[in-house]
C-alpha cells in the first residue's frame, strides 16, 4: 500500500472542484481529435505510462556561483528529499523514480530502499561525483578526475564510480550516469589526446565493473567548470566514448549542455539512428547551461525533441530512453517547479503523439516544406492539458498541480519541522 504524504482527502476535495469542467474539456478535445482520426483515450494511456525521474538534488533550492538563497523547509538529508519526491509523485503520477547522487545522498542503502518503497518510489540512474572533492578524500579533483594526469587520482575516481554501481545494485538501480568536469582553463594546459586517452582507459575500468543488466550513460557538456576545453564536450565525443566502451554504453543528452542555437533534436535523431541514445536530462535555457525549468523558455524545442522520440518509438519498440529532470530552482519552490516541469515534459510527449506521421511523411517525400512543418505545428498548437489532467486524475493525482499543492500547505508544514539552513548539499550537473 502506497503511503501518501498529502492526505488523500485534500486531493479529492481539490479534484471535486474541477472534475466537471475537466470532463467537458476532455470530451470537447476528444471530438476534435476524433475528426483528425486520433483516439484521445489512447493518447491518455500513453501519457499515463510516461515517467520522468526526479533528481534528489532538484528538491533543494539551487544557486549560482554567486549565491544561494535557501527556501523554507529545505530537505535536511536524503530522507527528507525522498519525502519531497513522494509529494511530486503523488500529485503528478508521472515521477515514480528518484535519481541519487553519491556522495551527496550517501546513506545505508537498505534504509534508502525502505524509505522509497513506503511511497512506491524506485531508483533511476545513479550519479557519481568526481567534479568536487568529498570530505576526507585523499586526492583532489582540482585538476581533473577520470582524465587526471596522475594515475592515483584516476584510480580514486574509478573506485568511486564502482562504489556508485555497488550502492545502486542494492537499491535496484540499473544505470550509472557519469558526468565529469575535467578539462582545462588555458591553452596549452593539457595535451588533449593524452587527457582523453586517460579518460577512456578509466571509463573502460568502470565499464568492466558494470553488471550485465546495467547501462552506463555518459553526459556531455560544452563548457564549465573548465572554461577553455572540456574532455566530454559534445555529442561527437560522447558518441566516440559509447562506441569505444561497448554495448552497455549510451549517450545522455542534457538539453542545456550545447552551444546556443544548436539543433538538439537532430543530435537526438543521429544518436538514436546509430543505437547510442541513452536518455535525457530535461531543462531549458536562454543563454547557456541555465538549468531553467523544462519548457519555460522554448517549449517548441522540447516538442521537436519529442517529435524525434515518438518517430523512433514508432520504428523500434525496444527504444526506451531514460528521462530525468535536471534543473536548478533558484527562485521557486522546487516541488512546484518539478511538478510543472514533469507535466511540461509529458505535454511535449502528448503533442508529439498527435503528429500525423502519414501526412508528414507524404509532405517530406513530396518536398512540400510548408505542409511538413504545418503537420508539426498543428500538433504543437493543440492544447493537450485536458489529456494530462485526466491522466493524473485517473491515477489519483491532482487535476490542478499547483492549486492542490498549495492547498495542502505542505511547504509550511515541513518548514515547521525542518530548521532553516545556511547552505545545503545542492548543486546541479
Ligand atoms: Mn545534467
Image: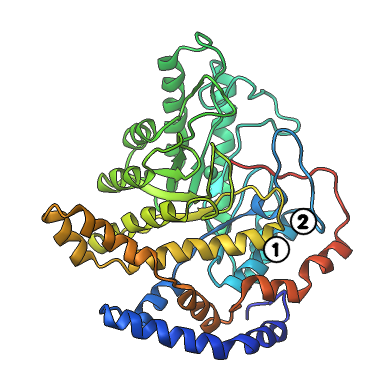
Name the element at disc 1: helix
**Residue beneath the point at 61% across and 32% down:** 131
Label 2: few (<14), some or many (≥20) within 10 Å?
many
Q: Give me the residue at 68% from left, 61% from top.
A: 335
Residue 45 position by quadrant: bottom left
- Residue 203 position within the rendered picture, expressed as x and y whole percent measured from the top left: 45, 32
The answer to whether marks 2 and 1 mark residues whose Cβ atoms lie closer than 8 Å is yes
Please give left or right for residue 63 compared with residue 242 in the image: right
The x, y position of residue 40, in whole percent, is 36, 80
Quadrant of the image containing the N terminus: bottom right
Which structural element holds mark 2? loop
Q: In the figure, is residue 155 to the left or right of 310?
A: right
Q: Which residue is mark 1?
A: 84
Number of labels in the image equals 2
Mark 1 surroundings within 10 Å by alpha-carbon count, few (fewer than 14), some (14 through 19), many (20 or more): many
Quadrant of image for the C terminus: top right
Whether residue 39 appears in this view of the structure is no
Colour setup of the view: rainbow
Query: Rounded to the nearest whole Å, what is the CA distance between mark 2 and mark 1?
Result: 8 Å
Residue at image x 43%, y 54%?
302
The reply to whether residue 147 is in sight is yes
Q: Nearer the viewer, residue 212 or 29?
A: 29
Report which quarter residue 12 is drawn in. bottom right
Amino acid at each position: 500500500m502506497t503511503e501518501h504524504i498529502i492526505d488523500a482527502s485534500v486531493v479529492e476535495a481539490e479534484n471535486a472542484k474541477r472534475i466537471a469542467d475537466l470532463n467537458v474539456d476532455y470530451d470537447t478535445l476528444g471530438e476534435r481529435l476524433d475528426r483528425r482520426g486520433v483516439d484521445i483515450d489512447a493518447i491518455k494511456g500513453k501519457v499515463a505510462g510516461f515517467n520522468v525521474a526526479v533528481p534528489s538534488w532538484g528538491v533543494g533550492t539551487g544557486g549560482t556561483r554567486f549565491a544561494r538563497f535557501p527556501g523554507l523547509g529545505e530537505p535536511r538529508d536524503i530522507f527528507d528529499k525522498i519525502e519531497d519526491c513522494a509529494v511530486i509523485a503523488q500529485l503528478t503520477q508521472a515521477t515514480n523514480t528518484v535519481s541519487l547522487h553519491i556522495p551527496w545522498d550517501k546513506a545505508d542503502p537498505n534504509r534508502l530502499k525502505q524509505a522509497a518503497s513506503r511511497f512506491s518510489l524506485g531508483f533511476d540512474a545513479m550519479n557519481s561525483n568526481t567534479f568536487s572533492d568529498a570530505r576526507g578524500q585523499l586526492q583532489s579533483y582540482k585538476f581533473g578526475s577520470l582524465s587526471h594526469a596522475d594515475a592515483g587520482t584516476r584510480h580514486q575516481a574509478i573506485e568511486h564510480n564502482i562504489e556508485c554501481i555497488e550502492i545502486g545494485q542494492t537499491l535496484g538501480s540499473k544505470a550509472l550516469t557519469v558526468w565529469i568536469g575535467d578539462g582545462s582553463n588555458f591553452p596549452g594546459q593539457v595535451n588533449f589526446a593524452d587527457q582523453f586517452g586517460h579518460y577512456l582507459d578509466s571509463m573502460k575500468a568502470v565499464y568492466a565493473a558494470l553488471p550485465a543488466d546495467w547501462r552506463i550513460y555518459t553526459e556531455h557538456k560544452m563548457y564549465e567548470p573548465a572554461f577553455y576545453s572540456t574532455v566530454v564536450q559534445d555529442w561527437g565525443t560522447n558518441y566516440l566514448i559509447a562506441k569505444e566502451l561497448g554495448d552497455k554504453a549510451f549517450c545522455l543528452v542534457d538539453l542545456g549542455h550545447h552551444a546556443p542555437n544548436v539543433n538538439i533534436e537532430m543530435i537526438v535523431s543521429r544518436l538514436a539512428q546509430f543505437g547510442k541514445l541513452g536518455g535525457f536530462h530535461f531543462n531549458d535555457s536562454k543563454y547557456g547551461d541555465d538549468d531553467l525549468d523544462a519548457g519555460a523558455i522554448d517549449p517548441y524545442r522540447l516538442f521537436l525533441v519529442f517529435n524525434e522520440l515518438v518517430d523512433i518509438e514508432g520504428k523500434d519498440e525496444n527504444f526506451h530512453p531514460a528521462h530525468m529532470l535536471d534543473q536548478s530552482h533558484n527562485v521557486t519552490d522546487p516541488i512546484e517547479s518539478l511538478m510543472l516541469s514533469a507535466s511540461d515534459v509529458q505535454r511535449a510527449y502528448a503533442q508529439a503523439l498527435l503528429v500525423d506521421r502519414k501526412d508528414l511523411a507524404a509532405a517530406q517525400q513530396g518536398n512540400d516544406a510548408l505542409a511538413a512543418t504545418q503537420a508539426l505545428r498543428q500538433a504543437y498548437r493543440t492544447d493537450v492539458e485536458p489529456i494530462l489532467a485526466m491522466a493524473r486524475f485517473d491515477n489519483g493525482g491532482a487535476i490542478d498541480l499547483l492549486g492542490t499543492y498549495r492547498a495542502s500547505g505542505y511547504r509550511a508544514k515541513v518548514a515547521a519541522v525542518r530548521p532553516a539552513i545556511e547552505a545545503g548539499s545542492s548543486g546541479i550537473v
